[in-house]
Image (cartoon, helix red, strand yellow):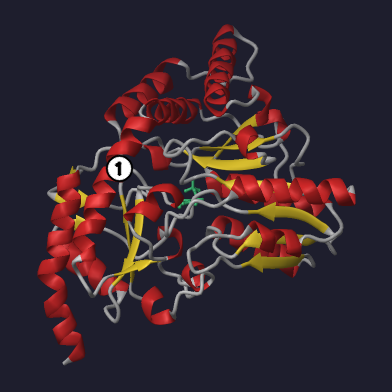
Amino acid sequence: MKVMSSIYLDWAATAPPDPEIQEQMQKIARTIYANPAAIHRLGREGEKFLSHCRQRMADLLGCGSEELVFTSGATESNNMVLFSLLHKKRDRRVLISGIEHSSVYQPAQTLKQLGFEVVLVPADRSGRIDPNRIFSALDESTVLVAVMLVNNETGRIQPVREISEAVQDFQKRSGKKVLLHTDAVQAFGKIPFQPSQLGVDSAALSAHKLAGPRGVGALFVRSGRIQRFLYSGGGQEFDLRPGTENLPGIAGFVLAAEKAIGGLEENHRRAVAAMSSLLEELAGMPEVVLVPGGGASDRAVDFSPYILNLSIPPLPGEVLVRVLEEEGFIVSTGAACSSKKKDRFRVLENMGIPGQIASSALRVSTGPKVEPAELEAFAAALKRRVPELMKNITD
Ligand code: PMP
């Protein structure tokens, strides 16, 4: 997709806007503006529209509408789940995968400072969290397991269904309840995702990765599984996330999700084909190391076709981003949320990727509008520029 004469390949950070969604949001903002909590006719209309949106979203997820809380984004959804543990005794154990987004990792660090035992379960070199590792880290004091569904830096799909079976098995044997949470931001609307089929208790979703608005997201949560900790107010969103509802944003999110899920299979097929031809081009470049590796056939099953992480050591990722920008391509070094942080290689290091490869990592992420020819042009730009850059750095 061309943006001001550049080809935008940073969809995992945020998707370019969709004019139809923007128009729909503006229309709702103009017409259904009353506070849904108001008892007058306009308020009742707002409430009716909100229920309609919630039901449409619940239908997409195959869950009950009472299991869906609209939030200000996945960061808030993830924080709500982790901080709900503050109602529990502080000596409890929390298991999170070592490759979680900062909106799970950072609240877990806060829980640690407050006395919880936080165990980071590392991924293997293929970027996968082994369910057996989760199983062996579960103990009688464990209250939460959080493993994301699609990693935002590598695209690796995690075996959340198997992890859920391991957790259920543990619950049966120990009689203890463990909350299983998944951050489904990079999965929802891109690969099939239904919380009940995965067997999770809660899941975080975000609108802007699907060309919906920023600052809007949702938390799927099975009834009664979490308690609000941080905010109290007017009782909206089942009192889990009080505050006047962002109706235009919610409407935009639901439309974005319907469009993404309606086109999911076709888009996925196209993305797999485009990614395969990019992988073929890159296979001819000995300098390129795929992170975590694997050929097109492994990737077809285990990875999202929308995210590719590659490294060209010893070229720093930042240099590659700049050079590619000169060539007209917008890519990133990794998660936008941690690109300026000291621990920005945390996710790759937790997969056992050596520092030199991690510091050279480049994330190429696409969406339904990206054409195969654009990815071919990207590979051609790498082929044009990398030999000269390598020569300069080794001279
Ligand atoms: N989790 C993952 C995996 C993400 O990629 C992102 C977006 N960077 C988030 C959570 C946070 O989502 P939001 O921007 O809606 O807060």
Give the x, y percent position of residue 163: 66, 51
Task: Residue at the far front: name it.
Answer: 297
**Looking at the picture, how far across and down is residue 93, in whole percent?**
78, 62
Mark 1, residue position? 271
Q: Answer above or below: position of 199 versus 152.
A: above
Give the vertical position of 391 relative to 373 (above or below). below
- On the question of residue 263 being in view, the answer is yes
Would residue 300 appear left or right of 342 to someone viewing this image? left
Residue neighbourhood size for the residue with mark 1, other residues' Cα within 10 Å, grouped as few (<14), some (14–19), many (≥20): many
Q: 194 or 26: nearer the eye?
A: 194
- Specify the quadrant that holds the N terminus: top left
Count of numbered tags: 1
Asked where in the image residue 370 lies, by quadrant, the reply is top left
List x then y, in percent, for residue 62. 59, 25
Which amino acid is tagged 1? Ala
Residue at x 43% of width, y 25% of height: 258
Indicate whether 314 appears above or below 84: below
- Residue displayed at 46% across by 46% down: 186
Classify the position of the C terminus by image quarter: bottom left
Helix or strand or loop: what does disc 1 sit on? helix
Residue nearest the viewer, comparing 150 with 73: 150
Which residue reaches farthest bottom? 395
Quadrant housing residue 208: top left
Q: Which residue is nearer to you in this view: 237 or 200?
A: 200
Tell me if 385 is positioned left or right of 233 in this view. Answer: left
Residue sitting at the far right: 175
145 with respect to 78 (left or right) = right
